[in-house]
Amino acid sequence: QVRLVESGGGLVQPGGSLRLSCAGSGGIVRIGNMGWYRQAPGKQRELLATITRGGSTNYADSVKGRFTISRDNAKDTVYLQMNSLKPEDTAVYSCNAKIVTTTYWGQGTQVTVSS
């Protein structure tokens, strides 16, 4: 059974950095597009960044220039480097991955930006 597991969340001060990881497991043959999302309390889920298997990326305006998505296809893992974090970045961050025709989701990791 395919699983995606995020890690790397936590509490960070404004202006700080975090690196999130999302590792896939469970007999994965080939992962296509991968992405990072976040959802803050009382808000809709927001798409932050996507990356194709070949490494092409897209970003939401809210994170462009501060966040960087990358992936390691050999490890079935996608990363999100987050710099210059702001209190409004506080949310549960989740990854997804498209495998053949199915999109899988991780369980999410909490990121809290506060002094």
Image (cartoon, rainbow, N blue to C red):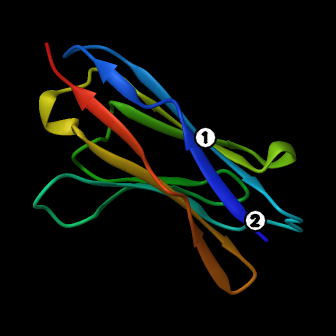
Give the quarter of the image for residue 7.
Answer: top right
Characterize the local packing of mark 2: few (<14), some (14-19) or many (20 or more) Cα atoms within 10 angstroms.
some
Image check: 2 left or right of 85?
Answer: right
Give the residue pinned by disc 1. Answer: 70
Say which quadrant the N terminus sits in: bottom right
Residue type at mark 2? Ile
Image check: 19 left or right of 90?
Answer: right
Say which mark, if any, is on residue 54: none
Determine the residue positioned at 62% across, 49% down: 5
In the image shown, does 17 or 41 lie closer to the viewer? 41
Determine the residue positioned at 27% across, 64% down: 45
Determine the residue positioned at 27% across, 20% down: 84
Select label 2 or label 1 by which is in front: 2
The single residue placed furthest to the left in the displayed view is 42
Task: Say if 82 sits above or below 47 in the image.
Answer: above
Characterize the local packing of mark 1: few (<14), some (14-19) or many (20 or more) Cα atoms within 10 angstroms.
many
Say which quadrant the C terminus sits in: top left
Residue 72 coordinates in the image, percent (x, y): 75, 42
Please report whichever mark, 2 or 1, sits nearer to the chain's N-terminal start: 2
Element assignment for label 1:
strand
Give the residue pinned by disc 2. Answer: 31
In the image shown, does 87 or 48 lie closer to the viewer? 87
Mark 2 vs 1: CB contact within 8 A: no
In the image shown, does 32 or 103 lie closer to the viewer? 103
Residue 83 coordinates in the image, percent (x, y): 35, 22
Residue type at mark 1? Ser
Image check: 92 left or right of 14?
Answer: right
Residue 90 coordinates in the image, percent (x, y): 22, 37
Task: Say if 11 sits above or below 76 in the image.
Answer: above
Give the quarter of the image for residue 31.
Answer: bottom right
Residue 61 coordinates in the image, percent (x, y): 24, 50
